Structures are given as C-alpha cells and as structure tokens.
Amino acid sequence: MKNVQKGFTLIELMIVVAIIAILAAIAIPQYQNYLIRTQVSEGMNLADGNKTAVSEFYNNTGRWPSTQTSAGLPAVTSVTGKYVTQVDASTDKGKITATFGGAEVNSKISGKKLVLSATDNGGSISWSCKTSAGTDVPDAYLPTSCRS
C-alpha cells in the first residue's frame, strides 16, 4: 500500500515565505509613508485653524498681523499637537508656520515646517502651502493641494 504524503514540502514553505517577504517589502514602506502623511495632516489642520483669524485681521486693517495676539490667536507655544511643536502666524507677514517635532514624530519630518502663505487677490485672500511658499516638508508627504 502506498503512503500518502500530508502537509507542505520544504520547497512549498520556502515559496510561501518568499511571497510574504515580497509583499512585506512593498507594504511596509507604503505604510510608513501613510503614517508620515497623517502626521503632516495634523500640522495642516492646526495651521488651518489660524487662517480665518489672519484673514479677518488683514481685511479689517489692511496689513498682516505682526504677533499672534494682535490677530486674536493664542501664544505660539500653546497651539501644539502630538506631532506639531508650534503654530506661528507672526514669523513672516501673511504666513502661518507649523513646525513638526516631538518624541513621536517621524524623523523624516522632524524639524520641518509646513507654511501656509497668504496672497491678497483684490480683496480675496488665497492660501498656498507649496514648497515655493516656504514649506520644507518633502512633496511625497504633503496633501495633494500642497504638492509642487
């Protein structure tokens, strides 16, 4: 009587391990990029919260705020997040800067800045966050509207 073989052979197991390794080599870097983009979106959300106050200040006075408090915003260091150490609307005229840092932020964006830059278009203010506006976060991690 013939013995029936059960289970996987060594070659079949090696093929399965190789397939899993290939899938992991593709998936892990993509997941890392996703996590970094999530961290950048926190900076965008925190900076977005200041756009209205800065725009209103400009529309009322005809100039950009020189300090956070003049625009009715809290102190620079009080607007923070898990990945953002500060949001500053007073460093440069018409710019809101979110600086990434902290223990949990990815090293690829640690110390980098997301800058929202305002432009007066004849009474209508538009905002840009592209690298030409001063953003030094790599394009791959920026929201689609901010990519160069």
Image: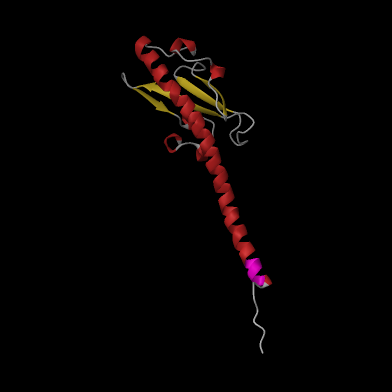
Instruction: Specify the farthest residue to the front.
Output: 1
Question: Of helix, strand and loop, which mostly describes the magenta segment?
Answer: helix
**One can see residue 79 in this view:** yes
Q: Which residues are magenta?
A: 11-15
Q: Residue at x 42, y 28 (%)?
A: 128
Q: Residue at x 63, y 70 (%)?
A: 12
Instruction: Verify whether residue 33 appears in magenta.
Output: no
**Left or right, residue 115 beside residue 102:** left
**One can see residue 134 in this view:** no
Q: Residue at x 43, y 14 (%)?
A: 64
Quadrant including the C terminus: top left
Up-down relation of residue 11 to residue 89 (above or below): below
Q: Quadrant of residue 84?
A: top right
Q: Position of residue 92 (x, y in %)?
A: 49, 17
Q: Position of residue 25 (x, y in %)?
A: 60, 54
Figure label count: 0
